[in-house]
Amino acid sequence: MYSFTNDYSEGAHENILDALVKSNLKQSAGYGLDEYSGKAKDILKNVLKNDRIDIHFIPGGTQANLISISSFLRQHEAVIAANTGHIAVHETGAIEATGHKVITVDSNDGKLTVEKIEKVLKIHNDEHMVKPRLVFISQATEIGTIYKKEELSKLYSYCREKDLLLYIDGARMGSAITSKENNLQLSDLVDLSDAFYIGATKNGALFGEALVICNDSLKKDFRYSIKQKGALLAKGRLLGIQFIELFKDDLYFDLAKHANEMASLIQDALVKNNYKLLIKSPTNQIFPIIKNTDLEKLNKKYSFTTWEEYDENHTVIRICTSWATDKEKVQELIEDLRNL
Amino acid sequence: MYSFTNDYSEGAHENILDALVKSNLKQSAGYGLDEYSGKAKDILKNVLKNDRIDIHFIPGGTQANLISISSFLRQHEAVIAANTGHIAVHETGAIEATGHKVITVDSNDGKLTVEKIEKVLKIHNDEHMVKPRLVFISQATEIGTIYKKEELSKLYSYCREKDLLLYIDGARMGSAITSKENNLQLSDLVDLSDAFYIGATKNGALFGEALVICNDSLKKDFRYSIKQKGALLAKGRLLGIQFIELFKDDLYFDLAKHANEMASLIQDALVKNNYKLLIKSPTNQIFPIIKNTDLEKLNKKYSFTTWEEYDENHTVIRICTSWATDKEKVQELIEDLRNL
Amino acid sequence: MYSFTNDYSEGAHENILDALVKSNLKQSAGYGLDEYSGKAKDILKNVLKNDRIDIHFIPGGTQANLISISSFLRQHEAVIAANTGHIAVHETGAIEATGHKVITVDSNDGKLTVEKIEKVLKIHNDEHMVKPRLVFISQATEIGTIYKKEELSKLYSYCREKDLLLYIDGARMGSAITSKENNLQLSDLVDLSDAFYIGATKNGALFGEALVICNDSLKKDFRYSIKQKGALLAKGRLLGIQFIELFKDDLYFDLAKHANEMASLIQDALVKNNYKLLIKSPTNQIFPIIKNTDLEKLNKKYSFTTWEEYDENHTVIRICTSWATDKEKVQELIEDLRNL
Amino acid sequence: MYSFTNDYSEGAHENILDALVKSNLKQSAGYGLDEYSGKAKDILKNVLKNDRIDIHFIPGGTQANLISISSFLRQHEAVIAANTGHIAVHETGAIEATGHKVITVDSNDGKLTVEKIEKVLKIHNDEHMVKPRLVFISQATEIGTIYKKEELSKLYSYCREKDLLLYIDGARMGSAITSKENNLQLSDLVDLSDAFYIGATKNGALFGEALVICNDSLKKDFRYSIKQKGALLAKGRLLGIQFIELFKDDLYFDLAKHANEMASLIQDALVKNNYKLLIKSPTNQIFPIIKNTDLEKLNKKYSFTTWEEYDENHTVIRICTSWATDKEKVQELIEDLRNL
């Protein structure tokens, strides 16, 4: 049984494990004030071509989202997200648990647009309703699509005009940035958002996300929020060490590229063999529509995520690749898809 | 410079790193539903001599506390803790952030007693005040003391009589259980509390705590709370793998014993050399009162935690040892203390 | 200028003011423990034909909703509501501010059905999502419609089967119960919901809602929640006195009937004069679609609530009547509508 | 039986009831946007000699406290209060329920001082602890004492130096301002605090507090918070009407003066008859220490609040007078005290 269920089925890239072993008995300060974390921040500031940003390493993505949003907003302020947005669907109401409404907007491609946000603002016009204040997007989105540079620019420019914050969930940022369709650089995000995170849990690390705060007004006292929500890791060095390795010699990008290529091979084969797709994805998650009888056969050798019922006889599944996906298994799957 | 600042200055015991390396590329299910976590739970149930308990692995201690307490309590219910209690002092209001008041009780030895709790209950007698519902204690306490079996039994028996929940923060459970003064077994806690956690971050692991829920009425839907608070690790296997290693051949206890012995050596030397102690500690944290001029000298070679000002010329410091503390450094420190 | 903007433009029925004046200097206990509140509860238990229910008087509707829901739910549990539901739209995220997600379901008539709820349950199937636990409906709904007895029975029976709580916002309960289309008695609600409130702010009182808790498991410690949310009125007698008067000689029902009749007169005239309606309403709120040029003329003499843009040239307005609506003004409005 | 239990045993001053009756059927806008509320704000701005302040009428004191504090603070920020502070003791954890810790400081006279606050700041020095940000005081305090002008000035000047907000709970502001020992004017508070409220529930109104926000940075979007917490009264006019009456011809001050005089008569008699006092109070609450056997006798004719056990044979009681306290009853009580 080979799993295409998600992109966190394996451990970490070997460089990371090596670095953990090597540094293991060296003493360091706790709670992210160690030299590794310091060095990793410097490396990232260099990658992002900006040294005025604040960087915080957070163990997980749900934490990064809930800490940021609850730190950035006043109690009556709300988030706007696509109906597919991770915070709106798969974080067990983590944002609401900190007191904030998540206003969802229907979206076929997982993306928000100025028009969609505008509609929300028009309705929310007095103190009997929450005040929309933060726009949450994911890059790549939860259904594999990405924002192009012009789309993001337009969105952020609108946000600034309307005094909205733009926050980017980058759980799969590596996959987005190394997508063939992408025309953004990681460093562009500093100018095109108020805060974003660079996800590593799903791209080579044991765990860890690098939260980048670009907007000065959001920086103050952020470590208090990390601690309060239980995300200030005692051995914060673990995060620093991992990010040092990931951003050495472009490893982070190489790993993501591999994931994208594996997904692309499968998606191309699907199209070639006349499978329908929920949406065409340029990243490491693809969403074919499979006959239930075929799915039953495939499930004997592979596991996938059931995305949603398509109709009585078909199911949308998610095939997810990662930095660790075995190319031979991909080829085997392609073969099996062809032979169904 | 050698650090006695805390018990999380190093990485993890080598067995853990070996196991992480060995299992690294094996695929497993996410979010703690993997076989490692399953096996680790079985091992712990065996150690705790009970298979009706629920076990959840949580990355950190503040998380374990805030998730448990917010899951166990209704909105008007409050916690009783010693004024030294970790949740009352060093978790940035994590419990209050979930909506619950922490009622503190002054305590010289870091411990709660029936008498102290009784006083709180007497005052909180109607709906204009919060309703005390959960008693929070730490084993070992934040100032190194421990509850003996008879003390804990008395406390729990009182709690049950008064419909109070008893929760034990076990960040330093290893040190407590292996203390020379201890007469409790780990498995006793199942019968003497409603929930407790066995801390590993401070005893050999990279990170991780094993939360044990003993009271049936607190078990339902607990994973929802873990996820909502951002503590359901994607690669939950990391926690399972670590606990398997820690509870193989009593490693967990051996590591804690080492920490205690190192602390004991230093404390004995301090007493022998006529240093005063804030309190006599049978665990891995000791609290000598040092002349400020002496401290200045020591700080050239060692780092400690400043606990509190004792008087104009003296400071209470915390010397903290761990599984990784180097015995040679301990002997060097003892030598230096003698020569001051 | 005459206002049809809402049903809280005037003070209170004169009987209430008389009773306030008469009782004014009599001393009574605070916080709802006075004899008036006691008597009012007895009267309501009689009206509701049940003396095992718990009744709490709450100053306002948003308070009644947020106190109940936050008291009834555990932190990971969520509410299901129609997209028009008051808590989902017009309470500034009051429910989310207590930590709970409100899952909304599109509804053309403001009502929930078993089918709609079923769909929500199907999707919310694991701990990565909130757990739907409470169904929120309004009687009458926010767009004037009502649940018939068979609809409510079906809904409640489904809720019990699925371990869902059913909560009814009765801000306009008077209007619903006295609607010509209604076939429910107020006392039926005790058997067809877990909790509901009987609104008086919008039906003759200065302010005040009577919350009725039918489900035994929701009763414990409820006054703690009222106090914590700031809704335990010091002079709780004010609520008791008002409910005594409202439920003397069916005043509550007579007042609501008047409001319904006034609305019905206007709605009938609208239909007769070929105005379109957003929805046909059997209660005190009606929703005609008016040409913008006509609306401009009407707005010189009357004020209404703008509900939503219908198209470029038309607007949906809300005309709201109340116990205090002047019949002469209604006739004048009808005349004016005819002459447009 | 005559009650000296509290200052909210009766209804409202007759002028208020008259005004309610007179205005009853006039239509007005909802939610505090009516002309009465507008006029009342103008009157108060005049009394406070400042028209840049923001004024919001809130139904109750717990609401005023919880809405203000939760609106003013970021999630990791905490309140400093005396251990006797109303929010710390008698509001069922209302502040914690909005996520904020209340740090309490022991105080014999119910007052905070610069020294006491300084100690708190010294301890709270990093992100592992909450960040003290708002100082909560009550004028008069919960045990009847008052801040003199020089005390308040010193406190506020310190707060500004340390970037702390100063908030004054004025539930008994009338009694404080009309106290013989007072040297503050109501208008001084605008310059000596960031926000405060003028309580009317306990001084002549049916209910209602006037919250005054002096600090510009705290004004934005405040009505959102009022609404979210359920305190935006539909018939907001009720608050406006009451405050118009209370601040017509100094009624508010006259009522408070009466309460103080009644308390003063009793306190003087107590002292004269050699009763001990918990503290000497210059306002409408006094705290004599009474022999339990005497208290038993008094309780046949009068009711008081039991404050605390003094010793085995004595009890501290609270005797509370109000605008409505009957002078004859006071004289009767004095007579009875003398004859015990």
Image (cartoon, coloured by chain):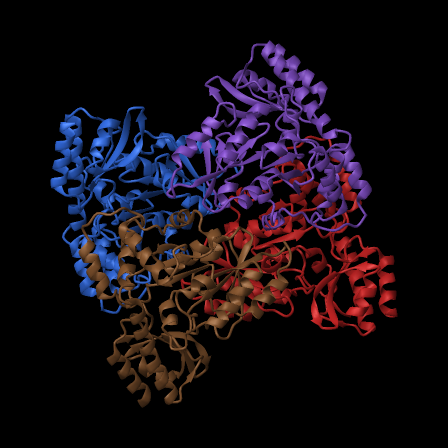
Chain colours: A blue, B brown, C purple, D red
Horizontally, residue D113 falls left or right of residue D301, namely left
> Up-down: is C216 above or below D104?
above
Horizontally, residue D107 falls left or right of residue B29, namely right
Count of picture labels = 0
Residue toward you, C229 or A216: C229
Horizontally, residue A139 falls left or right of residue D41, namely left
Find residue C163 and report its horizontal and vertical position in percent: 50, 38
Quadrant in the picture for the N terminus of chain C: top right
> Up-down: is B93 above or below C41?
below
Find residue C170 and report its horizontal and vertical position in percent: 61, 33
Residue A213 in view (yes/no): no
Find residue A230 and report its horizontal and vertical position in percent: 39, 56
> Up-down: is B125 above or below C298?
below
Find residue D280 and report its horizontal and vertical position in percent: 72, 69
Q: Quadrant of residue A16?
A: bottom left
Horizontally, residue A251 falls left or right of residue B266, namely left
